[in-house]
Amino acid sequence: MRRSAVVSVLAVVAACALVAVTASAALVGPQRVFTGDGPGNRHTPSASATWLPVDTSDAPRPPADGEVDRPAWVRLLLTVLWATLQIAALVGLIVVGALVGRRLQRAYQQHSRRERDPVAGVEDHDSLDSVDALGARARVVAAMADDARTQARLLEEGEPRNAIVACWHRFEVQAERAGLGRRPSETASELALRMLADDDIDAVAVSRLLVLYREARFSGHEVDEDDRQAATEALQRIHAGSGVLR
């Protein structure tokens, strides 16, 4: 739970407690809020109590049992405290109501905004992904450019079969140098294909070179100079599309 939600819950609980205290104070009156004996200590007259005649004269009467003759300033202070308690409870309710209303309004506005534009909530995330993609593509181009001469030289040297296999393996090396890294259950060839999956790179040339690599690596039929030439042409088109050759 977020901190703002916790604060809101505590504010509601405090306001409810304040209202309960105020209601209790209103029932017992201001004179007994701070000095009363409590509901459990009230004196109940017994059945055998003797009733005395009531004195209706204007003479001051002594305080009854359990009562304290408080000065006027004490009674005034208790009244002020009681009124302050009620005002504080009212202010607390207003503040809590305002907080809850503001939070509900904000939630409604966010919900309405998402309904109007579902993409708005992920714009920042997409922007970061775009920046990461651009950085990864730049690293791939740099890795391919640094290795372009070595890759072309390997394709020209040795037997056509070994040359084509070595040429394709350089794509796997370039992908690792670019920081792509192999995913779980991803083969080295799939890693190379992921690196070459770019709109600017000729997909037909990539497929052609991959077919030649698989034939040279896994098939038993002869691989000749024509296959080497086809692989060389495919590699040049790949390099041109990736920006390695300018």
Image (tube, rainbow, N blue to C red):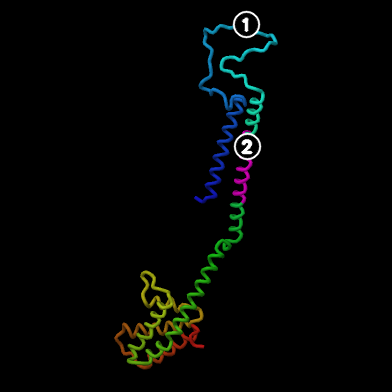
Could you say where residue 123 lies in the image, as x and y percent from the top left? Answer: 56, 65
**Image-based side of 227 in relation to 39, left or right:** left
Could you say where residue 206 lies in the image, as x and y percent from the top left? Answer: 43, 82
Residue 60, quarter of picture: top right
Could you say where residue 108 lies in the image, as x and y percent from the top left? Answer: 60, 52
Indicate which disc, 1 or 2, sits on the residue closer to the N terminus: 1
**In the orientation shown, which residue stands out farthest toward the left?**
220
Amino acid carrying label 2: it is Ala
Q: Which residue is mark 1?
A: 53
- Magenta stretch, overall SS: helix
Which one is nearer the viewer's eye here, 49 or 207? 49
Q: Which segment did they paint magenta? A: 85-105
Q: Residue at x 51, y 20 (%)?
A: 41
**In the orientation shown, which residue stands out farthest toward the bottom?**
225
Amino acid carrying label 1: it is Pro
Above or below: residue 141 compared with residue 112: below
**Image-based side of 117 in relation to 201, left or right:** right
Q: Secondary structure at mark 1?
A: loop
For disc 2, the neighbor class at 10 Å (few under 14, some 14 to 19, many from 20) is some
Residue 88 is marked as 2
Q: Is residue 92 magenta?
A: yes
**In the orientation shown, which residue stands out farthest toward the right?**
58
